[in-house]
Image (cartoon, helix red, strand yellow):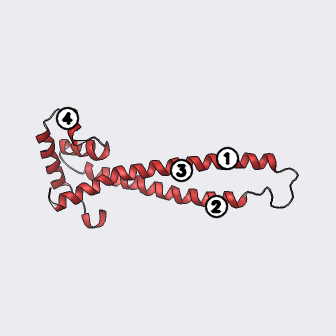
Amino acid sequence: MNREDRAKAEYLLGYIKAQQDAEDVGQRMETLRRRMETARRAAEDWSGGSAGRHGDLSDYFEKAEEIMEEWAGREADALRKMQEIEATIDSLEDAQQRRVLKLHYIDGMRWAEIPDAMHYGIDNIYRLRRLALKHLQIDTDTKC
């Protein structure tokens, strides 16, 4: 594989990384939401009778909201990256070339599994990959 094709393949691998990032952030956000809800319920139960800031969790909630906003931005960035990569693959004219790239870079199939899925020999899969990377139009300087 030449340097340009290697750069294109590296760019396409960004899909799975972005997907993992979005899932990780989503899980962290859900955990923080649950903790905030638990703290809200505890504060409501505890709020009667204490004086001053003893039972005040407003700083906690404010910081948690800031974190949630930051994470939501990271999740949105990851989803945009995934959409960008899918659109790049979808721009290929040849359906079989698109399918080969999607099976590997989007669905995460190993190259050795793709021949069975497409009912082709491994040599044809590698040929389709080579042609797909050759025809794929990306600006490797700005996207990789």
Give the spatial CA distance, label 1 vs label 2: 14 Å
Element carrying mark 4: helix
Marks 1 and 4, the one that precedes in the sequence: 1
Q: Which mark is residue 118?
A: 4
- Image x and y of residue 53, in percent: 80, 61
Give the SS element for disc 3. Answer: helix
In the rendered image, the vertical position of residue 70 relative to residue 112, given as above or below? below
Q: Nearer the viewer, mark 4 or mark 2?
A: 2
Q: Earlier in the sequence, mark 2 or mark 3?
A: 3
Instruction: Decide: few, some or many residues near mark 2? Use Cα within 10 Å; few <14, some 14-19, many ≥20.
Output: few
**Which residue is the site of mark 2?**
63
Going by the numbered disc 4, the residue's amino acid type is Met
Ranked by sequence position, the earlier of labels 4 and 3 is 3
Nearest to N terminus: mark 3 or mark 1 = 3
- Distance (Cα) linking label 1 and label 4: 48 Å
- Hey, which quadrant is residue 57 in on the image? bottom right
Q: Are marks 3 and 1 in contact (CB under 8 Å)?
A: no
- In the image, what residue occupies the spot 55% across and 50% down? 29
* Residue 84 image-quadrant placement: bottom left
Relative image position of residue 43 (x, y in whole percent): 76, 50
Task: Name the residue that disc number 3 marks.
Answer: 28
- The reply to whether dot 1 and dot 4 touch (C-beta < 8 Å) is no
| Quarter of the C terminus within the rendering | bottom left
Q: Position of residue 89 (x, y in %)?
A: 26, 50
Say which of 135 and 100 sits in front.
100
Residue drawn at x 68%, y 58% as measured from the top left:
60
In primary-sequence order, the first of circles 1 and 2 is: 1
